Image: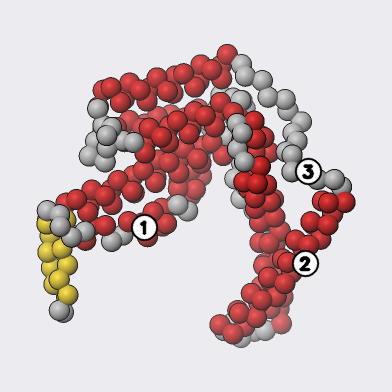
Amino acid sequence: MEHYYFDEYSRNQSIISRLDPRIKIITFLAFIFFIIFTSAQNIYSFAYYGLILIMLTIFAKIPFLFILKRILTIIPFAIMVAIFMPFLKGGTPIARWRIAQIHFTISREGVLIFWNCFIKAVLSASCLAILGSTTKFADLLKGLIDLKMPKIIIMVLSFMYRYIFLAEDQMMKIKYAVAARSCARPKIRAFSGRLSVFFIHVYEKAEMVYIAMCARGFTGDIKTLDAFRIKPQDIAFMLIIIALLTFIKSLTGGYG
């Protein structure tokens, strides 16, 4: 079955993909911190951040549609968190209307909070999408280990990424089996039965994988064929990006 991999463009011979994973992790995390601590009222800062991310996407040879799809997976969660913020009470009202006996008021402060959550979620998701797309997943995990990330988090990420495709395949097999045996439109009861069978298969697969890994002496360490070595271009990349972010801070003064 066809899958879309998180690190689909990590094997591109681009400037970004050849960088040391540890340097990329540090650089993009610094980028995210700059985004987070930017004042929501300073639109120019966010525009400059977006311009830098667009240039990084071009240098990484990643299609913009690929990055957009990754961003769209995050946006619904950000909207769900901030959807009621424009109706924040106690702020300066900018719009009022009434539906039946319910009064709605949109405040300026609420709209600002919504914008703050939305734009920062989009830019942060773009940073993570570029980082993941230009780095092999095993190298990304090993880089996190070298940066002293807790091993339990690394193991959870590793298993989630490796076996989510098996779970997807199992779900599709059950779906095709049900469709081959029934010409009627599936009902909610049939779907619940399909879901229970899916969880049983996934549980059995997890037990088999755990026993096989224990039998082979798995210790939780991530091993890769490539040895990490920081090169001058890695340092140059990190310094250039941080210098640009610092220059935007001094230029716009949009932090607080």
Residue lying farthest right? 215
Q: Nearer the viewer, residue 126 or 140?
A: 140
Residue sitting nearer the eye, 220 or 125:
220
* Amino acid type of the residue tagged 2 in the rendering: Glu
Task: Determine which residue is flagged by label 3.
Answer: 219
At 54% from the left edge and 32% from the top edge, which residue is drawn?
A: 25
Residue 122 x, y percent position in the rendering:
39, 45
Label of residue 204 in the image: 2
Q: Nearer the viewer, mark 3 or mark 1?
A: 3
Q: Position of residue 212 (x, y in %)?
A: 84, 54
Q: Are marks 3 and 1 in contact (CB under 8 Å)?
A: no
The local secondary structure at tag 3 comes to loop
Residue 81 shows which numbered tag? 1
Amino acid type, mark 1: Val
The answer to whether 24 is drawn above or below residue 88 in the figure is: above
Rendering coords of residue 228 (x, y %): 68, 24
Q: Amino acid at mark 3?
A: Thr
Secondary structure found at label 1: helix
